[in-house]
Amino acid sequence: MSGAPSPAVYPLLLWPQAASQAAVHVDWLIFAFTAVTLLLTVPIFLAITYFALMYRSGRQVDRGHTSDRNVKIELSWMLIPFFLTLAFFAWGAQIFDVEKHAPANALEIQAIGRQWMWKFQHPGGQAEINDLHVPTGQPVLINMISQDVIHSLYLPAFRVQMETLPGRYTQLWFKAERPGQYRLYCSEYCGTDHSVMDGLLYVMSPSDYARWLSQAGSSQSLAALGKRLFSNYGCSGCHGAGATIRAPDLAGLYNRPVPIDGGGSVIADDTYIRDKILNPDNNLIAGYKQVMPSFKGVIPEDELMQLIAYIKTMETSS
Ligand SMILES: [Cu+2]
């Protein structure tokens, strides 16, 4: 692969080259904020030094002071820095907002952090440990969770970082511009081997990525794997067609509001569905008797992601 320097050559890159447009924006924000901070602090330090020398004890100078106040000057030194820093708030909030909303056409990759490794699953069912392959030119959304303690997925070349939490899905997204190899890290201290919880991010042209997928060894897509689990774990016995137990139809469930027993509703997102499988007693659904067994300690995180991938594909029958 060409382009980016091999990580082995630069073990510690303090400011790795930006590998996406978004990363360039973040860099501009950092540059500009550093410049403004210097603009606001350097003159003060210089003035302090100057006055300390000028009025040091024993020096013959005029130490009388006037009682004149200049309201304009006093207002200006309060209001100018105030509005300058407020502008940075707006700028930062705008970048934050973009980072929070992945484009709809994003390629969704599932990630699991655990002591001490990363596991990634592609929509086609390909899985990899610590390393991650992605294509250029397409937004990549990483949906992640932790299997134990808090970790954090950090992609310095893209200036993005997100905590992985036990029990809740979090996301980050980026759009790679140039093929190359970049580093990925866990950036949340997570125990003895935290320092080796890292890997390589391979950014490939779409055709190279397609070739990589085809030889990465997967017989079935994530959703197809989930479909098999759905019958293996007996879900289909209650939720499938022809079930004798009255259980909700999961078709079209994803991202829809679910009415909750006792009023209100919750959106059936990934975290809700996962929680329902592990703790069915939470959020009882209005109009149903709770007979679903808990699958806590039974279904591991990677299979939960496969089940959810399958539930997402279930279309309404009507
Ligand atoms: Cu970690």
Image: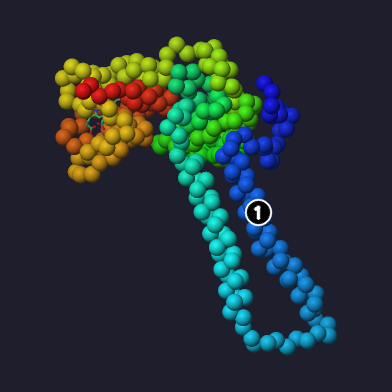
Instruction: Report if residue 192 is visible in the image.
Output: no
175 sits to left or right of 275: right
Q: Nearer the viewer, residue 250 or 244?
A: 250
Q: Which residue corresponds to mark 1?
A: 34
- Counting from the top left corner in percent of width and height, residue 208 is at 58, 17
Rendering colour mode: rainbow
Q: Which of 283 and 252 is in front in this view?
A: 252
Q: Which of the 4 quarters of the picture holds residue 47?
A: bottom right
315 sits to left or right of 104: left
Instruction: Give the position of the N terminus as an image quadrant.
Output: top right
The residue shown at (66%, 63%) is: 40
Number of residue marks: 1
- Counting from the top left corner in percent of width and height, residue 269 is at 34, 34
Q: Is residue 230 above or below residue 248?
A: above
Q: Which of the 4 quarters of the picture holds residue 305?
A: top left
Q: Is residue 150 above or below residue 312?
A: below
Q: Is residue 122 above or below residue 285?
A: above
Q: What element carries label 1?
A: helix
- Counting from the top left corner in percent of width and height, residue 257 is at 27, 37
Kindly identify the amino acid type of the residue bearing the numbered disc 1. Thr
The residue shown at (64%, 26%) is: 180
Q: In this view, does 293 lie above or below 96?
A: above
